[in-house]
Amino acid sequence: MSDQNIPLAAGRHYLAIPGPSVMPDRVLNAMHVAAPNIYTGPLLDMMDGLVADLKAVARTKHHVAIYVSNGHGGWEASLANTVAPGEKVLVLVNGMFGQGWANHAMGLGLDVEVMDFGKRAAWDFDKIADRLNTDQGQIKAILCAHVDTSTSYKNDLQHLRQVMDQAGHQALLLADCIASMGCDRFEMDAWGVDVAISSSQKGLMTPPGLGLVWFSDKAAERQKSLKQVSPYWNWAPRANPEGFYQYFNGTAPTHHLLGLREALTMLVHEEGIENAWARHEALARAVWAACDVWGQGGPVEMQVPDAVDRGHAVTGVSIGAPNGTKLRDWLSENLGVTLGIGLGIVPPDDPDWHGHFRIGHMGHVNAHMVLGTLGAIDTGLKALGIPHGDGALTAASRICAGQD
Ligand SMILES: *Cc1c(COP(=O)(O)O)cnc(C)c1O
């Protein structure tokens, strides 16, 4: 820490971590009401519109189920409705969340086969094609993260669907879109994704507590062939309820629904999903441009080397231990911005853990928030004497000005 440390942290603190993301005041205010009636009235009346908007976000005409859960609940829901214990699933992994979903599948008694591509590599589609071509129909579902938030890899789901079709493979395609939904382009129907999962607290700008599962007709048919489905996770009544309580298998998450309603109004009806994707892309490119410049004069390196493989909601960075943790702590204490920890790159008890951090740029973020975060990092690098290239902010500004 520098000797002439000027305290500059007062003012609105900014949590720039990859979820929970920044919640718009409008969303929080929409939740600040007395308990609404759950038997009749506006809460019930708004469900048709809410469901339509959720489908618009995932670009599907098929079905959606809403759970009182986080994203892990979405993982469990998707498996409970598509596969039976003992059946085989193939999990494509390039980060901690892909592996986490695989672990859930094991816990549910599935026969789990993991293809792990490491933490610094995109999927190898030749290997995936080889595996699918030799499979005799044992693999019932392919599980994968669209964007793995631990590494920030974005995986090419369209290409995966192509490879599956070329192999004539009938497995269901299940995608974890928890980090990407509302941030990165995602076209459930056009890309042939059978089940997509998200949760409320990332691109959807609502407090944690809702798990969302979109599913295709093919997945719905598959569910009907299962001998038994957990009543709580059963998506059929939730997607096609006869009474309001069936949407949630019990009492509705009243205030989360009000918050989500406001967030979807902002995302779908005001900004528009295409514009939200374009905003996330530009802001991500600004972050990457700054990282590139820092890296020209010091040990700053993005986790994903190739820009086409990077998600637009989060950027994983390594800077060498212990400077990752030092930088995060310094920014939190002195400049009022908190960066995300490095997750799943090395174990928490490894000294190298302190060399990693992540910048969250998902949901309710605009250019001044991202440029402010980048300016804060640039300041921290200087204050802590960490070597880095100069001119990161100029590079980021050019992106936001549309000049690069
Ligand atoms: C955040 C996240 C999860 C976990 O979601 P929880 O709500 O914490 O259960 C899973 N997968 C991805 C890709 C995520 O970004």
Image (spheres, grey):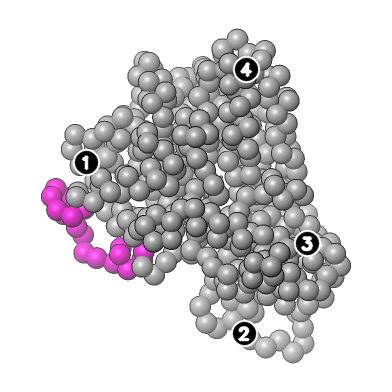
Disc 2: CA contacts within 10 A as few (<14), some (14-19) or many (>=20): few
Q: Position of residue 82 (x, y in %)?
A: 44, 24
Label 4 sits on a secondary structure element that is: loop
For the residues labelled 1 and 4, the Cα–Cα distance comes to 42 Å
- Examine the rendering and report whether any part of residue 72 can be seen: no
Does ligand 1 reach within 8 Å of label 4's beta carbon? no
Disc 4: CA contacts within 10 A as few (<14), some (14-19) or many (>=20): some
For the residues labelled 1 and 2, the Cα–Cα distance comes to 49 Å
For the residues labelled 2 and 4, the Cα–Cα distance comes to 58 Å
Amino acid, disc 1: Tyr
Residue plotted at (66% across, 56% down):
315
Amino acid, disc 2: Leu
For the residues labelled 1 and 3, the Cα–Cα distance comes to 51 Å
Residue that carries the numbered disc 1 in the rendered image: 245
Disc 3: CA contacts within 10 A as few (<14), some (14-19) or many (>=20): some
Residue that carries the numbered disc 2 in the rendered image: 8
Q: Nearer the viewer, mark 2 or mark 3?
A: 3
Q: Which mark is residue 292?
A: 3
Instruction: Please say if 308 is above or below 24.
Output: above
Residue that carries the numbered disc 4 in the rendered image: 167
Does ligand 1 reach within 8 Å of label 3's beta carbon? no
Along the viewing direction, whichever of 280 and 44 lies nearer the viewer: 280
Amino acid, disc 3: Asp
Label 2 sits on a secondary structure element that is: loop
Q: Position of residue 207 (x, y in %)?
A: 41, 58
Instruction: Please say if 403 is above or below 168.
Output: below
Q: What's drawn in magenta, residue-wise?
A: 27-43
Residue plotted at (34% across, 30% down):
234
